[in-house]
Image (tube, helix red, strand yellow):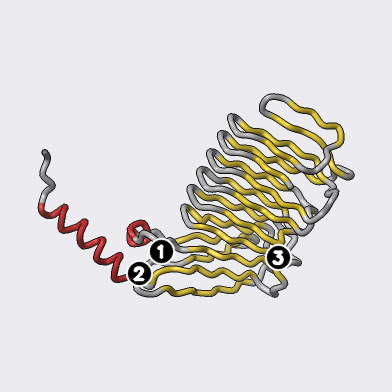
Amino acid sequence: MKRYAPAAILWILGMFLLSACGSRGEEEELQRVTLDEVEVLEIDHGSTTLFVETADVEALEVSLLRSGSSAGAVVDQTDNRVKISLDNDITRMLNIGRIPQLRVKIPADYAGKVEIDGSSGKVTGTGLQNHSLQVKGKSGNISLAFTRLNNDVDVSATSGNVNIQLDEETPDATWVLQSGSGRRSIAVPLQDRNESNRKTEGRTGDGEHEVKLKTSSGNISIK
């Protein structure tokens, strides 16, 4: 049996002790940024769970529920682009059972583009409307609820499932659903429906907005 070096054992113990000390309390920081003249809002949530919401707020609101010792959210603004990301912190990876949650509230009158990128973090969107939306994920599930689907949507995931919920009976959209080994389920009646082994296409309403949903092994559901 291999023996670990004493220094390595001490380092591992030290990291877990640091994690335990930092998990005693949770803090939530709140940052506000106006989106006047901002054309692109970029959210890079990594492996952290993301909750994004369109809300009746005057400015973008970013908050991170975290343990007291872990790093926080970073909001950078350059010209017409705002980027939200997370500081890297090893105590976040070791803080089992207290995984941070990133919450983003987008003003309802924001009509720019929202780009979301993550790895294993789950994405949940509620009340979505007005802005175009692009979501890229790997193993985390992506669940998006739209109050009104009035812009383009592009969602891709590797092994994560994609779930879309619509408040409208007949949104004006052209649909393209692609999956590798995953299942596809759509409860909205499609006009000009075209079905193949890995793709479902069709139109609802006037088909004005383009909705692309793609997974490798995950399932796709629209209801």
N-term-proximal mark, 1 vs 2:
2
Please tell me which residue is depicted at 77% across the width and 39% down the height of the picture.
Answer: 175
| Distance in Å between CA atoms under marks 1 and 3 | 37 Å
Q: Residue at x 60, y 56 (%)?
A: 124
* Residue at x 65%, y 57% (from the top left corner): 40
Label at residue 9: none
Q: Which residue is mark 3?
A: 37
Sooner in the amino-acid sequence: mark 2 or mark 3: 2
Which of the numbered marks, if any, corresponds to residue 98?
1
Residue 13 horizontal side relative to residue 5, left or right: right
Specify whether 7 is left or right of 57. Answer: left
Label 3 secondary element: loop
In front: label 2 or label 3 = 2
Question: Where's residue 13, x and y in %?
Answer: 20, 60
Residue with the mark numbered 2: 23
Q: Quadrant of the N terminus?
A: top left
Percent of width and height locating residue 23: 35, 69
Q: Position of residue 181 (x, y in %)?
A: 58, 30
Crowding at mark 1 (Cα within 10 Å: few <14, some 14-19, many 20+): some
Tags 1 and 3 in contact by the CB under 8 Å rule? no
Q: CA distance from mark 1 to mark 2?
A: 7 Å
First reached walking from the N terminus: tag 1 or tag 3: 3
